[in-house]
Image: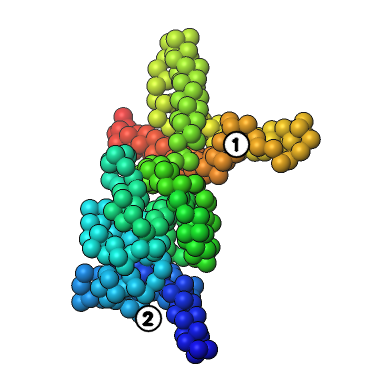
Amino acid sequence: MDVEMADIEKTIHTKENTICIFGTGDFGRSLGYKLLQVGYNVVFGSRSQDSTPLLPKGVAVMDYGEAAQRSSIIVLAIHREHYYFLTNLSHILNGKVLVDVSNNQKVNQYPESNAQFLAHLVPNAKVVKAFNTVSAWSLQSGLLDASRQVFVCGDDSNSKRLVMDVACRLGLTPLDQGSLLVAGELENYALHLFPMWRLPFFISIGLTAFFFFYCLITDVIYTSIKEGKDYSFLIAVSITNRVFPIVSLTLLALVYLPGIIAAFVQLYRGTKYRRFPHWLDRWMLCRKQLGLIALGYAFLHAIYTLIIPLRVYVRWWHNNYLISQVSPF
């Protein structure tokens, strides 16, 4: 009896420490390699065991049914249109945690999210949406240059906890977003290009346009009308080079200003545990982007500063060349 109990406990422990991945594409391979690094056993489910030469060493590759029996957590690294074969495995997937990592090609491409569609196909499985905002490249690069946040949603709290534990072991930061109804928003989130860059980008464009037209009016148009000379040659380099440092310093000020405002808000409220106003919270979240754009403007200013003396030298060389071509009388 003791031997049988020991075997059962060993089987349960093996299943909990084994992750099954359906699909051997870029994301599936990258996730499998990362799971192996943190100590998980990895089993791949694939249609063909002969077409997987790029899989990491130490993983087992077998058909979907056999692979699903090896683990209680199954990651579906396949597209939505390939989900239909799962109905044939419904008796094996009962009670399993199915992690949907898929995204769509367009925002709101289907009436329901991919995770909800999966839950309808396999109603007795526990579907969790996670890892859809993590790319294969970020997993391969060791998560050094990517966001570590992983949004997780699902209707079963225990299943979400298991998936969040896996994310923590991978060095990621899981964020519980609620029930499976939020899955559609998570899938749309992955389609937004640079979601935290939109506001800093518009601010930079607005400041650039404002200061450019201000310098254009004061240094070119007004001066041309007053003196009767054409100063349009200043637009290409001189005016542009004057705008870059102004915008760069303004953006740099916008990086540090919300921190000062937040400090005064906390002093006024007498606590640091109340949430900031929405506009201030959003402003503080964009500080890194504002700083990077400010650095870009400073870099452009440095390049244009090097161009100005080159223009002067080229003009001097051209004038001397013309003079040298004039034969003396």
Tell me whether circle 1 and circle 2 mark residues in contact (CB < 8 Å).
no
Q: Which amino acid does label 1 sit on?
A: Asp
**x and y, in percent, of residue 207 in the image:** 50, 27
Picture layout, residue 90 above or below residue 248: below
Question: In the displayed structure, does residue 167 sit left or right of residue 83?
Answer: right
Q: What residue type is labelled 2?
A: Gly
Residue ID for mark 2 = 58
Picture layout, residue 217 above or below residue 249: above
**x and y, in percent, of residue 292 in the image:** 52, 44
Say which mark, if any, is on residue 10. none
Mark 1, secondary structure of its residue: helix
Label 1 to label 2: alpha-carbon separation: 46 Å
Identify the residue at image location x=69%, y=37%: 274
Q: Which of marks 1 and 2 is in front?
A: 2
Picture layout, residue 288 above or below residue 16: above
Picture layout, residue 206 above or below residue 320: above
Residue ID for mark 1 = 281
Identify the residue at image location x=56%, y=36%: 282
